[in-house]
Image (cartoon, rainbow, N blue to C red):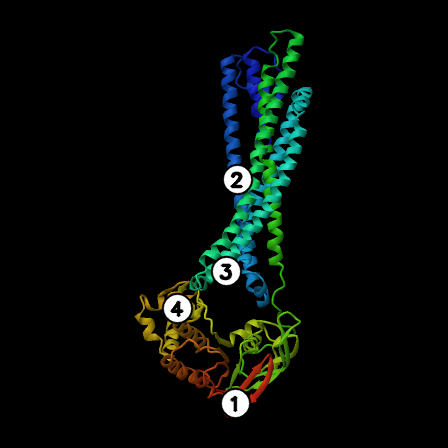
Amino acid sequence: MAIVAPVRPYLIQVTVDKTIGNQINLPNWLDSFINLFNTNNLVSFIAIITVFQIVLIIIETVARFSFSFITAKLGQLVVKDIRNHVYKNILKLPLSKFDTTPIGTLTTRTINDIESINEIFSDGLIPIIADVLTIFITVFTMFWIDWKLTLIALIPLPIIIIATYIFKESVKKSFTQVRNAVSALNAFVQEHLTGIQIVQAFTAEQRELDKFKIINKQHRDANIKAIFAYSVFFPVVELVLALSTALIVWFVANKALSVGENNIAFSGKIVAFVLFMNQIFRPLRVLADKFNVLQMGIIATERVFAIANETKEKQATNIITKNSISGNLEFKNVWFAYNNENYVLQNINFKVNKGETLAIIGSTGSGKTSIISLINKLYDIQKGEILIDETNINHLENSFIRQHIGFVLQDVFLFGGSIFDNITLRNPAITKEQVIEAAKLIDMHDFIMKLPNNYDYEVLERGATLSLGQRQLISFIRAILYNPSILVLDEATSSIDTESEQLIQQAIDKLIKNRTSIVIAHRLSTIEKANKVMVLQKGVIQFLGTYNEAKKLGYLH
């Protein structure tokens, strides 16, 4: 495209000069091409040049289409691979990263910022190279035709260079503010839509709307600054182009007058140079903008790669391969802190053998949930060791451990999709018959069959179409289905009515047979069948013994 661009204005110059009778010296290649048609007729000459122009236009159109399509396709291919890589890495980040990073920020990095990388290809680096090539080849052609006139035409160029630099810096600053505002908007909307129930329950809609308006105003102001820069820059470019055109006409007119008032020898040259200047200034209009796209893409790339290169969760070292887990679990002198300073668990020691059930009780913040988070290596301990079947979990692969541990949490999370997909988590190895069998075990099958489309019933995000108790029952099916060696119940019956709890308790009795179970609960009916009861207070074990001993000492009431 860059090579073809200056040819058409030159051909127009040749046509004008030939038409008005000027003597022209054609390049050998063009002269040879025209002589192929063996004609000196002016009409034929113009027809040949016109056909040649049409061919060049077709070539340029095909080239421009190919250029646009290939660069856009390249950008999409790169974006697809980067987005897959980033999301894969996010899935492997330690849970502590999610504790300190808003989900909306990670969403922005995965969606918006990666899309900015695509713009590097479609509107940034490669188009800049194309524009710069076009400018250089056009200027070279102008010098070849008339170096003096070229110098005159380029006199205003420093003005456009200075204006471009000022514009680039102004828009860069504005775009950075826009990106930060977009990230803040995403984080705010993600968080508050997730917690919309709390917002509405406490009639906080207006307060949250006021906060949103402030962030949205920052986004608007940043965009307006960029718009102002564009509004100033483009008229400046037009003024400089007009000035350059005026200089061309002035110089040629003076030169023509110096050799005779009616001399028209420079007519074709004027036309060609005006077209050349348009070819130079057309890419200059958008070159600064493309540099900003490139810069924003680089900034977005740094943000994306920061996530892509984020330290993944700690993996096992000196891996010990096992085919299965029996379920023996032991904590030895375990100390744990979320921020490496304030320990939430201090010198924890206990052992649960295969088939035993350990009930953990304690006030809020005592460390109950922290203990179960450590069992499947969601967090890493600072001191001590955790053993499964007398093997340090640091020597067992994370995926292997998690395949053999089942969780039923108090806050059940269901994904958008069918009940079947939420139970199986889209594991193709699990059949519908297995799901039905697990559902029947806790008497959920009949309830599911009454729903529209039964197991294909669509559950909205976070299970909004089901009650909290129903969501918890589905999580029980999920845990039972995976037949874990170790079962963890974190306040799993807290939102279940008494009748449902009795049904679940019967299922639990079957489920915990020959299986290690860790139960966090306040209801005595859940605790009384435990082999051991552990009482936690401020991260320290206050009591570890039988249910009867705990009750006698007043820990149960």
Distance from disc 1 to disc 3, alpha carbons, whole Å, reads: 41 Å
**x, y (%) of residue 249?**
61, 17
- Chain-order first, disc 4 or disc 3: 3
Distance from disc 1 to disc 2, alpha carbons, whole Å, reads: 76 Å
**Residue 125 visible:** no
Distance from disc 3 to disc 2, alpha carbons, whole Å, reads: 38 Å
What's under tag 1, amino acid-wise? Gly
Q: Nearer the viewer, residue 186 or 4?
A: 186
| Residue to which mark 3 is pinned | 191
Please rate how many residues cluster around mark 2, counting C-alpha atoms within 10 Å: few if below 14, some from 14 to 19, many from 20.
some
**Residue 97 visible:** yes
| Residue to which mark 1 is pinned | 554
Residue at image position (55%, 53%) is 183
Q: Is residue 151 above or below residue 497?
A: above
Q: Nearer the viewer, mark 3 or mark 2?
A: 3
Q: Nearer the viewer, mark 4 or mark 1?
A: 1
**x, y (%) of residue 12?**
55, 20
Please rate how many residues cluster around mark 4, counting C-alpha atoms within 10 Å: few if below 14, some from 14 to 19, many from 20.
many
Distance from disc 4 to disc 3, alpha carbons, whole Å, reads: 27 Å
What's under tag 3, amino acid-wise? Glu
CB atoms at circles 3 and 2 under 8 Å apart? Answer: no
Residue 143: which quarter of the image? top right
What's under tag 2, amino acid-wise? Ser
- Chain-order first, disc 1 or disc 3: 3
Q: Nearer the viewer, mark 1 or mark 3?
A: 1
| Residue to which mark 2 is pinned | 68
**x, y (%) of residue 325?**
54, 80
CB atoms at circles 4 and 3 under 8 Å apart? Answer: no
Q: Is residue 48 above or below residue 349?
A: above
Point out which mark residue 463 bears.
none
Circle 1 SS class: loop
